[in-house]
Structures are given as C-alpha cells and as structure tokens.
Image (tube, rainbow, N blue to C red):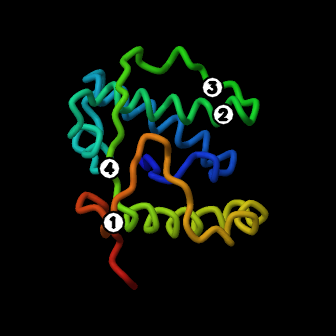
Amino acid sequence: MRLWTIHPKYLDAKGLVALWREALLAQKVLRGLTRGYANHPQLHRFKEQPNPVGAIAQYLRAVHQEALRRQYRFGVSRIAPDHWLGTIQATDGQMLYEWCHFLGKVEKRNPNHHAMIKPILTPDPHPLFSLIEGGVASWEKIPPSS
C-alpha cells in the first residue's frame, strides 16, 4: 500500500489507478470493515487525525478530481460520506523520498511519462498535505541499501 504525499497529477495511468484502489482499501481499513492492513505504516498519519475516515475520504476526493480531469471513471460513490476540512502535516523529506521512489518505479513501467516528469525537482504535495521541514517519516519502510 502506498498513499502518496505527492500530488496525484504526477502519476501515470497505472499509478493513478493503483492509488485509487489502495486508498479505497485504506478507507475500508479505517472504517473497520476489514482486518487486513490494520497496522500498515501508511495508515499512521491518517489514524493520528481527529477523523481518520474523513481524512482518507478527503484524500480520495483529490484522487477522484484528478481522475475526472483525465476523463477516467472512478466511482465517487465509493468514497465515504465523512468530511474533514483539515490538512495533515508531512515533511518535505518524506515527499522527496517518495518522489525518488516514484521516479524509479515509473522509469521502468512508463519511460515516456518518466521523461516528462523527471525534470521536476520539487513536486507539489497532495492537497491534503501541508509541508513542513523535516526528514523521512519514522513510519516509512526504507529498504536496506545493497
């Protein structure tokens, strides 16, 4: 599960569809409708909010807006009706870590898309997040260097 801090506008088609599915799964977990993934690190920042379901619903709404912009048909009715008008603080270090991770993934699966976004040094965050200075989040699972 990867709930990107980067804005969904940067995702290629496969990435946007995967994000939609993973965020819907996260919503299901946060609503207590499944036992799997309950302790997934990507959910920590949502669980810390006063209204975790409202926070993931807002996250999904932004993904849905990007899908609409691209004329994709993501079912808005799948988003929980909960609303939350807050933002979640995320560090610039976390976002840049994710950006590098994403660039590596997209370079392999979609070289043309990679070539378009590679020049971007500082991507915009997902609208749910407000950036603060800092390193990679403590919940992030960083693979050991080889």
66, above or below 1, in the image: above
> Around disc 1, counting alpha carbons within 10 Å, would you say few (fewer than 14), some (14 to 19), or many (20 or more)?
few
Cα–Cα gap, marks 4 and 3: 27 Å
Check residue 133 in the rendering and tell me which mark sits there, or answer none.
Answer: 1
- Badge 4 marks a residue whose secondary structure is strand
Q: Quadrant of the C terminus?
A: bottom left
Quarter of the figure with residue 54: top left
Label 2 vs label 4: CA separation? 24 Å
Residue type (three-letter) at the residue carrying disc 2: Ala
Q: Which residue is mark 2?
A: 67
Quick check: 134 left or right of 120? left
- Give the mark, 4 or 1, whose residue is nearer the N terminus: 4
Query: Marks 4 and 1, Cα distance to the nearest angstrom?
Result: 10 Å
Of the two numbered discs 1 and 3 on the same chain, state the one appearing first in sequence.
3
Of marks 2 and 4, which one's residue comes earlier in the chain?
2
Which mark, by number, is residue 74? 3
Q: Which residue is mark 4?
A: 89
Residue at image coords 43%, 68% = 97
SS type, badge 3: loop
- At horizontal 64% and vertical 47% (from top left) the residue drawn is 9
